Image: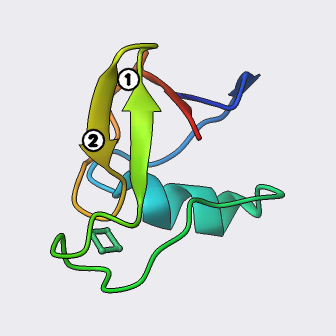
Amino acid sequence: MRIQGQEHEVPSGQSVLAASLTLGTDSAPEALCGMGSCYACVVTRNGSEQVRACVTQVREGDSYDW
Ligand code: FES
């Protein structure tokens, strides 16, 4: 998967939020509830789709920006 323009290898099944925190990316998406209720963690997937990072599982080849 690609986070903010950088390619990363992450285990499948992780949320985008968990993956970004595990990777130690400089700025993980903001998160409040961690369970899909508050929408504070909305990120852009593949340049156009808005998804919640805490409840969206990473997929091979996807790109995320925030
Ligand atoms: S942190 Fe609240 S919806 Fe993701």
* Above or below for 51 versus 64: below
The percent position of residue 12, horizontal first and vertical second, equals 33, 45
The percent position of residue 2, horizontal first and vertical second, equals 60, 26
Mark positioned earlier in the residue sequence (2 or 1)? 2
Label total for image:
2
Q: Quadrant of residue 61?
A: top left
Q: Which residue is mark 2?
A: 51
Residue beneath the point at 46% across and 61% down: 17
Q: Quadrant of residue 8?
A: top right
| Disc number placed over residue 60 in the picture, else none | 1
Q: Where in the image, quadrant-wise, is ligand 1 located?
A: bottom left
Circle 2 SS class: strand
Residue beneath the point at 69% across and 31% down: 4
The Cα atoms of the two marked residues, 2 and 1, are separated by 16 Å
Circle 1 SS class: loop
Between 1 and 37, which is closer to the camera in this rendering?
Answer: 37
| Disc number placed over residue 34 in the picture, else none | none
